[in-house]
Amino acid sequence: MTTRTTQATKNTVGNAFANWDTIGKWGVYQIAFDAMKAGKIRLYEIVEIAEAEAGIRESVIRMRRADWIRM
């Protein structure tokens, strides 16, 4: 599957991470990982956005993705 990330998807995920305190950790990850599951964004893009918007390191995003898959 080829993923083409639109600016709208990047904005949605970016806004979620920017509103971390309002949405909550798992709400933010749900938005990001649901978009990823739908083929709208790739993990490396989520990593870049999370770092830029919320200062979250790649290792944390990958750990949360593993947690999400196990849920």
Image: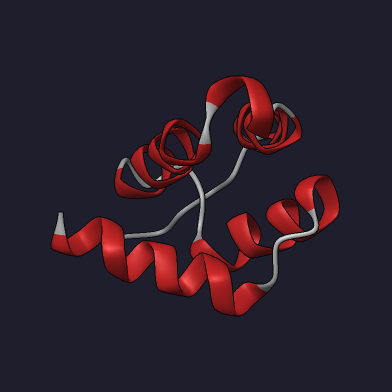
Name the image quarter holding the N terminus. Answer: bottom left
Would you say 1 lies left or right of 28 here?
A: left
Q: How many marks?
A: 0
Q: Compare residues 15 and 64 and report the one nearer the observer.
A: 64
Would you say 66 lies left or right of 7 here?
A: left
Image position, residue 8 (x, y; %): 66, 25
Model colouring: secondary structure
Location of residue 57 with respect to 16 vertically, above or below: below
Name the image quarter holding the C terminus. Answer: bottom left
Q: Quadrant of residue 38?
A: top left
At x 84% / y 54%, what residue is drawn?
Answer: 52
Would you say 3 lies left or right of 8 here?
A: left
At x 67% / y 29%, what residue is drawn?
Answer: 21
Q: Quadrant of residue 45?
A: bottom right
Image position, residue 27 (x, y; %): 44, 31
Q: Compare residues 49 and 10 and report the one nearer the observer.
A: 49
Q: Compare residues 7 and 17 and report the one nearer the observer.
A: 17
